[in-house]
Amino acid sequence: MLLTVVIFLPVVIAGVLLAARGLGARAAIGLWVAASAVDLALVGWMWWRFEPGEGASGVVDGLAYEADLQWIPTVDAGYHVGVDGLSLPLLALTGVLFLACAIYSLREPDRPRTYAALFLFLQTACLGTFASLDLILFFVFFDLTIVGMYFVIAGWGHGNARRSALKFFLYTFIGSLALLVGFIGLFLGSDERTFDMVALAANPPLADSPVAGGLVLLAIGLGLAVKTPLFPFHTWLPDAHTDAPAAGSAVLAGILLKLGTYGFVRIAMPILPEAWQRWAMVAVVVGVISVLWGAFVALAQTDVKRMIAYTSVNHMGYVLLGLGAAGLVASADEGARTVATVGAMYQMVSHGLLTGALFLLSGVLWSRGHTYAFDRWGGLARPAPVFAGCLALAAFGSLGLPGFSGFIAEFQIFTGALQATPVATVIAVVGILVTAGLFLVALQRLLTGDPVDPVVPAEADADGTGERPAPDRTDGHTVTATRPEVSARVVDLRGHEVASIVPLLVLALVLGLLPRIVLDVLEPAAMAVVELVAR
Amino acid sequence: MTGMSGGGERVLALLPELLLLLGAVGGLLLGLWTPQHRQRRVRLLVTAACLASAVAAAVALPEPAERVFEDTWVVDTTTGVVRIVVALGVAALVWLASASFAGHPRETEAYVLMLLGGLGAVALAASGDLLLLVAAYLLASVPLYALAGFAKDSAGVEAAMKYYLMGAFVGVLMLVGVAALVLATGTTGYSDLAVLLPGASPGLLAVGILGVLAGVGFKAGAVPVHFWVPDVTAGTTPPMAAYLTTIPKIGAVAAAFRLLAEPFADVPLDVPLLVALIAATSMTLGNLAAFHQTDVLRLLAYSTVSQVGYLFMVVAVAARTDLAVPALAIYLAGYAVTNVGAFAAVAAAPVARTITDWATAVGRHRSLVVSLVVCLLGLVGTPPTAVFVGKLAVFAAAWDGGLAWLVVVAAINTVASLFYYLRWIAPAFAGVPVAPATGEGEPGSGPRTAAGTAQRIQRGPVVVLHAAAVLSVLLGVGAGVWLAAATSAS
């Protein structure tokens, strides 16, 4: 019951927001913040009361806050939700990130009531996906996230938003239908004809038909790979991110990408263990290609937001590397495979926090200068020290500096995967070097050097200094003389921006220094997954 | 087979149909004695008859399946579902049409014809005999010819003409098919045909099956006899377009389902494959043709062609899986609700013919856009709407029936269909009309209603649209309840 309240509270508030026509802008956003805060508090309460259990626990047993109702009896699909060590950290991440987005959007000027309602709707869809223990219910929420995000991008995006939104919808919709086909395959292949994940994981379908199992895994893998996204299905991601509003990008990267990787852990691995073992090497290879592809393409970007978007491809590649390694039963012991799985799950949480912060910070850039281009920014450290500090922290965290959550995650993935696939792991480590390089270059371009006016194009800057009177002519150099005025245009982080971004960074830091908070919950579930895959 | 040759005592088994007939006759008589401006009472009578018929059908649903009147009329789950959906659909469409018919000189006749067409659709679904099938085909066609050209303008007359010629031609094909089957077996009852057809000569069998399927395919608007759908839909008024693309289709799909499940189940030809091919081409051609439509009615017309493709998936596996009947039950209901809703959106702004016009016309009615989005995404099959549950059930049934390739084709087509629905959703949602594409007609070319109703949003259709959107979601979320009620007989 508590879980159901957590899932549906946001959408109920969204309905209230839509119905209350007379509600003012600030009141609407205030209600949104309040609803998100209450929801997060409830998730926190659930975490507090959650018993992770000793040894392997989760997926098929040890489920808390369960609810199970019949929905479509002819195909045995139901409203079955529950929480275990896999879903709880992601539910908490969803609560945190949506609250951060709500606070960040406190001054949203454009149709704030609808905007808040859409995000609350999205929050319900995301929470529902993570809590689902029924394939059809999972699919329902999974699809609704696409619909919600489409309207966020199409309605509040900038640049070529309509086209990017369409691309996003079509790509991910293809993925979700592949997923649906795979789910129907699981249903028809199972002995008792059910869509219930717990029953399917306990008694895996298609165990004795490797071809059918492989094809069903292909369909499911395809669907999740589009969402994750993995190379070569990632091409929707940079466009969608670039044109989405900052809060939309943060949710898209922080939560929606996790739906894909979470699907692998929750559905593909426990329900199709044999097929996953057989094709684990494919997951590893695709993961490593995504790592390298994401890193190198990000290096070549001239647009801050596109660069961050491509690093998401890189980070999700690590997750798949870890999950693939968990399936290589023959070449690694159980301990190593568990470490890899834990690392992959940890990476999901860590990436959600850090990339969420990075995208919100890039939204600050947009709000100040309406551009993400590297060459239109520079020397931000002087006029905007708080922004610079936050960006530096987020970037260092994202490149995997020890002390941040990203390090814990990537370290465990590499440790766990090294035994199973030494070559792939070593290649993937190269990705870390490249991301380190690209984040440092990005910091250098944005924060150091001479301040650049983002609004006036660079060439106009060179000869257009006479447009405005230089206040300080004592040094006799017009270009330097204009600097104070130019940089005055860039305002440092405002209160609500600080209040939304800093907590994310603090959490990333806490999870980097005190990883046991999450590991205590994650490890039993990861062990359960590894045991189920090894069947 | 109960073999009720006496028949008299089982007249009550046809109570839902009798109520529809009574409503039609009573409405006609009442209309004769009612002044022009008071014809609202005919509408009330017709609606009451529809609701009573639906209630009677719902009461009869849990009873075991039976065949009455010398096995010609089958009362089972499929019939029961069609009875309810058609009766409620006609009731909703009467109110949808009332906005453009109110005060019309032939208002009563329109409602009566709608009721008779609905009766024809139910008869199609319930036919257990080839001759009754032909009669039902005529009953589900003739009133519709009149309705298609009801506005008496040039586009309407052209639509009616096209519909009539095509219907007459396919009707002949169907009669040839029936004749061939009679020649092969000497009987017309489905139960006897099921026994005798497997031993019939393949040539006659092929002609017969093709002819009969052409007939039901025409009523359903399936490829390759779909040519009437876009022209008739775009030529007539939006409420009539909703009627023509909803009511007869439901009956025809159910008729095809029964044919595949009973007489054609064991024939030596691969009829399921033929139907699967019809399904695949319907959804594919319907989608491809819808891609570049800028006229909302034509877009919806092609969308109904593709929807019939999905419905025919379950027809193909009618005899092969237990999942087929529930899948048909939920998809038919979901399709009817959602399709009526989408056409109601057009009827709400009847002067706006193109997507751009429509988005401009509803500009400030945001709730209308929300309901349209629910209906259109419902047609795509976005959860948790009714069509999603229907698609899920249909996909599972088709795969279970050995047509996994068709499921893949259908999934790809679903993605493709999203594209053109979004072409309508995006400008409507954004509220700012997109730059008009080349090839669009003049704004407002082709007014379909009386001049006084132009340029404003009509209240009746808006109510139907909102109701359809809500019902579409409710039916999706409450699919279990509906299926439990519908399939309780078997």
Image: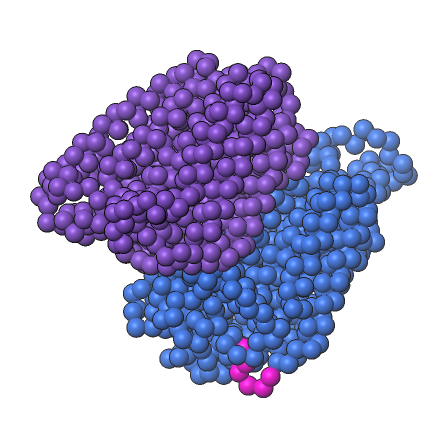
Q: Which stretch is magenta?
A: A53-58
Chain B colour is purple
Answer left or right for A136 relative to A456: left
The one of A356 and B185 positioned closer to us in this rendering: B185
B420 relative position to B257: left or right: right
Q: What kind of secondary structure does the magenta stretch mostly adopt? A: loop
Chain letter matching colour blue: A
- x and y percentages locating residue B242 in the rendered image: 47, 32
The answer to if B387 sits in the magenta stretch is no
Indicate left or right for B273 with B99 as reference.
left
Specify the farthest residue to the left.
Answer: B201
Image position, residue A53 (x, y; %): 60, 84
Work out whether residue B217 can be spotted: no
In front of the other: A31 or A168: A31
Q: In which quarter of the image is the N terminus of chain A?
A: bottom right
Task: Name the spot of residue A463 as percent of width and height, x first.
Answer: 74, 30
- Location of residue A110 in the rendering, given as x and y in whole percent from the top left corner: 73, 40
